[in-house]
Image: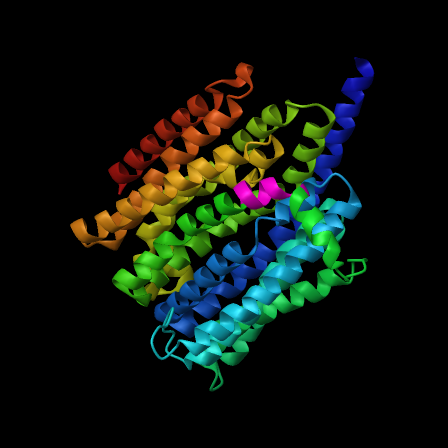
């Protein structure tokens, strides 16, 4: 008994140290972004940031579709050999399919275009393909290094990306490539991050074709259940961006995308660092003692929601004057979207920080079911709001509320698998709903 407590304390302290390492890197990256983003918002304007948003959204959808859900399989594989095999297979399959997709998109461009960024379409598609390959490589390498526990390497990623990105876009804003600036900045930031990580991946990259069937067989639950669930979740997450772009144009999307970018500053500090450590710790807990990952997940969600409540309250009270002051008066219309999405993320951050929880406790089927429910409900709700109210703000609000309700009920179900924790997640979130309503009422009263 005493020995068990000592072991748990040691594991807890290691986890804490790893989280602090990742948060240090993320905090440094957020400081860089906070300092430099006000410069780029004044140099590029709302519409060009809207173009960047639809570019990133489209790349995310393609990555999700061609990724086969195997990034999490790297983390939970039983042996290093199995993890390495998954890593190589995913890169091999995805890169080939990305190149085929880009060729097809360019070939049919006379009849169909996935977006219009105001630049040469074929160049934008080539940039998209290169960006997708780099993002996929980054995701898989991140998972590999995370499995290896190389947090000293990973902590530099959040610093490299915003630094390279902002330096590039600031330089290009003064050249004839300004229309391409935000896109090229994103691509080169991903390239720099991959160059940094790849130095620490030591393996033979040759994939033996005869091993493919065995790799797929071992990871069939990820491919059959986690993959479609992950893709559908990604599609659902990108719906507001796609619908706002096609229904209201790139300027409205620019306001919304900037709101998401600002939300990601405190959210990234909290959840991005934690999620990388969480999946490793939760997987080990579940392997060592089945069932313990559930209580661990509930504690993590409570902590991150409490932490994110602080910036949410600050934005609700002071966002109306703070955002235009920092970004420029042209961005004042983004404040209302920022307030909505801060409230949305308050109820999403616990889920995002513990992504992979369903895989850890082997509930991939329920994850896929919930994803299908989202895929049915969200398009109907969003397009219904678009055509009923014709207001982008209401469209975003409908998405935020429906997303929050479904996620709360879903995680309450997963955590409730441990009977001792039944409805604990729901009751905790209901308290947060009441607190948030009180904060909004007080803010409106004083304003």
Could you tell me residue 83's position as x and y percent?
73, 47
Q: Is residue 181 visible?
A: yes
Task: Note whether 61 is above or below 19 in the view shown.
Answer: below
Q: Is residue 342 magenta?
A: no
State left or right for residue 82 relative to residue 28.
right
> What segment is highlighted magenta in the picture?
218-226
- As drawn, the residue found furthest toward the left would be 388
**Quarter that holds the N terminus:** top right
Task: Note whether 71 is above or below 415 in the view shown.
Answer: below
Which is nearer the eye, 438 or 131?
Answer: 131
- Residue at 57 percent of width and 47 percent of height: 269
Residue 186 occupies quadrant: bottom right
Q: Is residue 141 visible?
A: no
- Residue at 59 percent of width and 43 percent of height: 222
User: How many marks are shown on the rendered structure?
Assistant: 0
Could you tell me residue 124's position as x and y percent?
46, 76
- Residue at 49 percent of width and 51 percent of height: 264
State left or right for residue 21 relative to residue 305.
right
Could you tell me residue 88's position as x and y percent?
71, 57
Which is nearer the eye, 143 or 189?
Answer: 143
Residue 132 occupies quadrant: bottom right
> What main secondary structure does the magenta stretch of the protein show?
helix
Could you tell me residue 92's position as x and y percent?
66, 62
State left or right for residue 36 relative to residue 58.
right
């Amino acid at each position: 008994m005493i020995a068990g407590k000592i072991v748990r304390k040691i594991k807890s302290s290691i986890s804490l140290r790893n989280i602090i390492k990742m948060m240090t890197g993320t905090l440094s990256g957020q400081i860089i972004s906070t300092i430099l983003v006000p410069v780029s918002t004044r140099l590029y304007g709302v519409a060009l940031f809207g173009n960047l948003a639809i570019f990133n959204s489209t790349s995310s959808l393609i990555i999700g579709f061609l990724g086969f859900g195997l990034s999490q399989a790297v983390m939970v594989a039983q042996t290093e050999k199995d993890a390495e095999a998954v890593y190589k297979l995913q890169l091999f399959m995805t890169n080939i399919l990305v190149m085929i997709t880009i060729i097809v998109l360019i070939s049919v461009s006379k009849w169909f275009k996935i977006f219009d960024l105001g630049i040469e379409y074929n160049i934008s598609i080539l940039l998209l393909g290169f960006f997708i390959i780099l993002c996929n490589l980054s995701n898989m390498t991140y998972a590999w290094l995370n499995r290896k526990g190389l947090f000293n390497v990973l902590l530099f990623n959040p610093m490299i990306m915003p630094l390279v990105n902002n330096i590039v876009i600031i330089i290009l804003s003064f050249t004839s490539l300004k229309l391409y600036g935000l896109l090229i900045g994103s691509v080169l930031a991903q390239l720099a991050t991959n160059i940094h990580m790849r130095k620490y991946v030591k393996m033979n990259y040759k994939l033996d074709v005869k091993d493919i069937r065995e790799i797929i067989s071992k990871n069939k639950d990820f491919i059959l259940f986690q993959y479609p669930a992950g893709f559908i979740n990604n599609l659902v997450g990108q719906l507001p961006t796609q619908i706002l772009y096609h229904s209201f144009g790139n300027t409205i999307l620019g306001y919304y995308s900037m709101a998401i970018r600002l939300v990601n500053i405190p959210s990234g500090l909290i959840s991005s660092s934690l999620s990388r450590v969480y999946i490793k710790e939760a997987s080990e807990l579940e392997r060592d003692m089945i069932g313990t990952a559930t209580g661990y997940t509930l504690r993590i969600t409570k902590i991150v929601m409490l932490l994110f409540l602080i910036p949410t309250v600050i934005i609700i009270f002071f966002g109306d004057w703070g955002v235009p002051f920092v970004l420029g008066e042209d961005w004042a219309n983004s404040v209302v979207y920022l307030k909505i999405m801060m409230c949305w993320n308050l109820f999403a951050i616990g889920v995002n920080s513990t992504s992979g929880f369903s895989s850890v406790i082997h509930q991939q089927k329920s994850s896929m079911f919930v994803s299908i429910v989202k895929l049915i409900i969200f398009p109907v709700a969003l397009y219904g709001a678009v055509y009923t109210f014709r207001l982008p703000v209401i469209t975003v609000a409908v998405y935020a509320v429906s997303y929050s309700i479904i996620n709360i009920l879903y995680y309450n179900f997963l955590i409730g698998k441990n009977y001792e924790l039944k409805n604990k997640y729901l009751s905790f979130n209901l308290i947060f709903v009441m607190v948030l309503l009180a904060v909004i009422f007080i803010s409106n009263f004083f304003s």
